[in-house]
Amino acid sequence: METSNYSYEQLSKEIRELRWQLEEANETIEAIRTGQVDALVVQNGNGHQLYTLKSADQTYRVFIEKMNEGVATINKEGYILYSNTRLAQMVHLPLDKVIGLSFEALVADESKELYRSITEEGWIKDCKEEIQLKDSNGKQICCLVSCTALELDEGMTLSLILTDLTVQKKHTHQLKIQNELLEDARYLTEKLNDELEDTVRARTKDLLISREHFKLLANHITQMTWTNLPNGKVNYFNQRWYDYTGLTFEQTREWGWKAVVHPDDLANTIAKYMSALQSGQIFEVENRYRRGKDGAYRWHLNRAIPLKNENDEIIFWVGTATDIEEQKRELDRKDEFIGVASHELKTPLTGLKGYLQLMTFYKNDDLPPRIKQYLTKANMAIGKLQYLVDDLLDVSKIKAGRLNYGMQIVNLKQIVDDCIENAIHIYPAFTFEIDNKTGFMVKGNAERLEQVLMNLVNNAVKYSRDVKKITIKTLKLENWVRVSVTDFGIGISEEQKNKIFERFYRVSDKKNMTSGLGMGLYISSEIINTHKGKIDVESKLGKGSTFYFDLPLEKA
Ligand code: ADP
């Protein structure tokens, strides 16, 4: 057709008509796509022609439009005859640009060969493959493509269904990582488990050995042993306990052991036991246990120590009861001997002292100076001997419960002053710091109280090293009066503090060992006890000690 033969009006009309036809065609395509029509009349060179869409096709078209997969049909040359919206979205192209494109243009270079081979195969039989598409930005999309040949009215076409595998791939990848992590964790757990099993096996073996060890040890030592819980209930005894008491575990467990303690010792035992449980300090008490076979009570020394965990909490106590019956008898014999010996010594000592005194009367006469000197030294030696014998006699009297003396209201200031005067006289190398207040009246025996105070002063001198200073004080504490003697000497350890008031106890410290028999503090504490008072010490090793006794004040 020659364009020049057309007038402007004719051309405008034709363009309007074509535009209208195009619009109509677009609407029709949209209507077909969305399933709104199933028949249409198309005008072509041969006049109007009716095209019907098979009703089943209409349903499928709706499905295809709504599908999450990309769908295309291509002809033999590979050109896209139909594409659903999803495919256009996948490749980021407008739908009208996709239709008419060669499908291969949407395939990434690396997949082109595979694409060709599957589309070739697809015409013959259904097939599936994973290929890479590329979108309009060049980004690759991993897809599963399924090919099926379709016979349509317009001839044979190949239908391609494209499933976007990106998310699935991502998930698979994540799953793989998770699996790997899981596998690592499983391996580690298994390893840890093996190690743990080894440790448990080794520990169980150790535990078994140490249990057997403990049982063997516990059942073969000469002492009776037990363990008790922090609440005091006994939960184990060794064989010796059953052999000695003749009783069973059931009879003596928890608090059942009380039945075999001598009734006279029970209150003291329970008091010390409870106090140890409360304080967590070592439990120590002497008491008598009844022997099963003959009902005899034998003295035992009980000791228990707490076993603590890493948080310093007591888990249980381990105790031993050692038979000290023989030692007790031995000690009784020794006491008896001391009593007799000191008594026997006293008579010749008194005689000796008398004769020496007589000789001293001749001092001013014409005695050679050397003899006078010997007399003075003999008097001093006799004085020391007298102290010793007196102490020994006191100890045996205390043991026999016969340390008796009269008590009256006495002025403590006077007693302390007398002692100070005495001390200044016999220890000229020492300075005495005094704070002796008036007005303290107590009920007691002046001589015995002086003996106690002098003993504390003598010890302060004896156990001082470089600092030759002693402080003596009296102090009112509510209804009590305290007399204290402070030195700056060798001091006493915490452990020894409780022991020094025992009979014949001396701290075994070779470096600072001095003469003495360990009787002074024992006698002092007995005297203060009979005065209804308290005697004690505060001390720091290497720094010095303050010994003090408290007496109840008498009302003026
Ligand atoms: P003795 O002094 O004769 O040994 P004591 O009964 O007076 O006996 O004292 C018992 C123990 O207490 C002493 O052996 C000594 O170890 C210790 N002791 C007493 N007084 C003091 C003190 N002031 N400083 C340090 N230790 C002391």
Image (cartoon, rainbow, N blue to C red):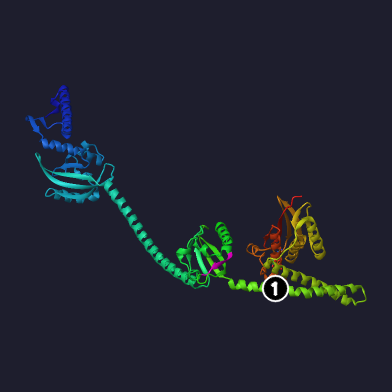
Q: Does the magenta run of residues contain 489? A: no
* 355 is higher (above) or lower (below) than 154: below
Q: Position of residue 102 (x, y in %)?
A: 19, 43
Of residues 509 and 89, which is closer to you in this image?
Answer: 509
**Residue type for callout 1:** Ile
**Does the image show residue 430?**
yes
Q: Tell me the residue at 73%/59% (across/down).
A: 486
Residue ID for mark 1: 338
Q: Tell me the residue at 18%/50% (across/down).
A: 128
Q: Quadrant of ligand 1?
A: bottom right
Q: Is residue 373 left or right of residue 545?
A: right
The quadrant of the rendering that contains the N terminus is top left
The magenta region covers 285-291
**Does the image show residue 518?**
no
Label 1 crowd (10 A; few <14 / some 14-19 / many >=20): some
Element under disc 1: helix
Q: Does the magenta run of residues contain 287? A: yes
Is the distance from the Cβ of mark 1 to the nearest ligand 1 atom less than 8 Å? no
Q: Position of residue 295 (x, y in %)?
A: 53, 69
